[in-house]
Image: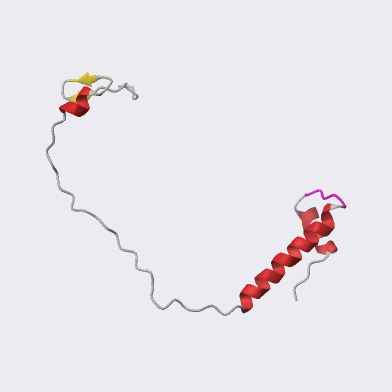
Amino acid sequence: MATFTKEELLKIAHLSSLKLDEQEIPVFVDQITAILQYVEQLATAQVCAQTEPIRNVNVLRDDIARSTDPEPLLARAPQRIENYFGVPQILEEK
């Protein structure tokens, strides 16, 4: 059975530069002991192997160019320059 002592907690707190109140020490010792016991249980637990592996399948559609009428979309653009969207310039010309 896993146990965790007050001295171990104080050593870890010192190495981590953590300040602990006297009231926190027994709480943390109990919590860390519980965690270690749980991990110990996991190490000995028998796990059923999954009978069928999960198959990851990408569902992709064919990449087919379709012609559409750009006018409805361009009509909603804040700025339009002929048949393109107008955007603010972000790069400087050299």
Residue depicted at 80% across the width and 57% down the height: 27
Locate residue 90, reporting x and y percent: 35, 24
Q: Position of residue 44 (x, y in %)?
A: 63, 79
Is 34 or 21 nearer to us in this picture?
34
First to last magenta residue range: 18-22
Report the front residue among 82 and 14: 82
Is residue 10 something one can see in this rendering?
no
The residue positioned 32% from the left and 21% from the top of the image is: 88
Above or below, 22 relative to 44: above
Which residue is situated farthest in the right direction here?
A: 22
User: Left or right: where does residue 39 sit relative to residue 71?
Assistant: right
Q: How far across and down, in percent of the image, does residue 38 sit? A: 67, 69
Of residues 6 and 44, the one drawn nearer to the viewer in this rendering: 44
Dividing the picture into quadrants, the one containing residue 39 is bottom right
Determine the residue positioned at 31% across, 22% down. Answer: 89
Q: Is residue 36 left or right of residue 5?
A: left
When the figure is inspected, residue 36 is found, relative to residue 89, above or below; the finding is below
Is residue 57 depicted above or below 66 in this figure?
A: below
Q: Quadrant of the N terminus?
A: bottom right
Vertical placement of 72 versus 24: above or below?
Answer: above
Left or right relative to 59: residue 69 = left
Residue 45 magenta? no
State which quarter of the image contains the C terminus. Answer: top left
Which secondary structure dominates the residues rendered in magenta? loop
